[in-house]
Amino acid sequence: MSESGILVEVDDGVARITINRPERRNALDTGSRDALLAALDAARADAGVRAVLLTGAGDAFCSGADLSGGGGRSDTPTTSAPAPPSPSPSPPGIDSRAVNETLRSGSQRLIRTLWEFDKPTVAAVAGPAAGMGAHLALACDLVVMAEGARLIEVFARRGLVVDAMGAFLLPRLIGLGRAKQLILLADDLGAEQALDWGLAQLVTSRVALLDEAGAWAQRLAKGPTRALGLSKTLLNRSLESSLDQSLLDEAMAVALNTSSADLREGMVAFMERRPPQFIGR
């Protein structure tokens, strides 16, 4: 399926979602952003989809929001010419309320959807992932990067405040000090350094990228989907929960999982000393 610059292929339990705007280095305009959200919503609702592989066409993963003006409204509003200095709270031509609502319904909603997705997600990053594009990758459970790929917190280079949930994600993934280093200095972070910092879990050649990332997605798609989803929710919440709340959440997740057919299969397979055959329910 192809819609508004987003390609979706479902095979053997894996939904491979490709941002297909190589002429814009896979920058997302309003249409492609909304199509990506729709593809994620469809993958969540489809019981036959048990993992998602997110990637970009060509030599980039996603260069962020499309600010060209040719593809509709972008997540970061711009004016046709630089606004003159003004003592007013917002420069002429920019409605601060509209900016707030655009972020909440656009990039924030998109990244949050990935972060809270209840099935395993893998990002295959072939090239630059900048701004919102970097956060798209980092909101996935596992990040596979090609040699030479880069994560770029580009906001300070444009005079922008970090957005698209970056201020939430980065301190949780790499700590406050390194998060400030990335945001304030706005330097590129290469694949090997991303691996060293824990922002990527695997670095491979460009040629092998989709095979390596696809293998992980296939492996996850063969797993106990409900248990994996509940486990990732517990891990995500643990970053901001008290011990008491974390233990309560854990007990509730374990109880929810007791009705899972995959739990029964896992127990029977263990007793019969054979590999389990999970069905995702």
Image (cartoon, rainbow, N blue to C red):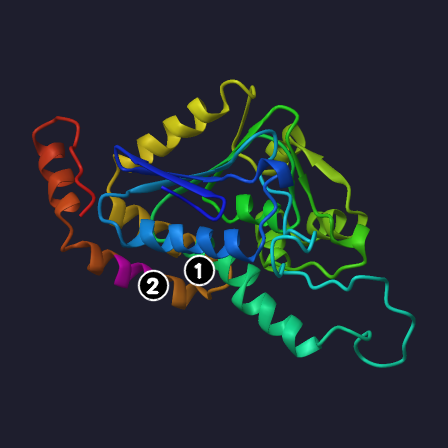
Q: Tell me the distance, in whole angstroms, between the alpha carbons under discs 2 and 1.
A: 9 Å
Badge 2 crowding class, 10 Å Cα cut-off, few under 14, some 14 to 19, many 20 or more, is: some
Pointer 2 with pointer 1, Cβ within 8 A: yes
Q: In the rendered image, which quarter is residue 51 located in?
A: top left
Q: Residue at x 28, y 54 (%)?
A: 45
Q: In the rendered image, which quarter is residue 205 located in?
A: top right
Counting from the top left corner in percent of width and height, residue 183 is at 74, 52
The amino acid beneath tag 2 is Asp
Please give the range of residues in magenta. Answer: 249-253
Q: Residue at x 15, y 33 (%)?
A: 277
Residue position marked by numbered label 2 in the rendering: 249
Q: Is residue 251 magenta?
A: yes
Note whether 205 is above or below 75 in the view shown: above
- Label 1 SS: helix
The amino acid beneath tag 1 is Arg
Q: Residue at x 44, y 57 (%)?
A: 113
Counting from the top left corner in percent of width and height, residue 167 is at 64, 59
Note whether 53 is above or below 136 in the view shown: above
Q: Quadrant of the N terminus?
A: top left
Residue position marked by numbered label 1 in the rendering: 237
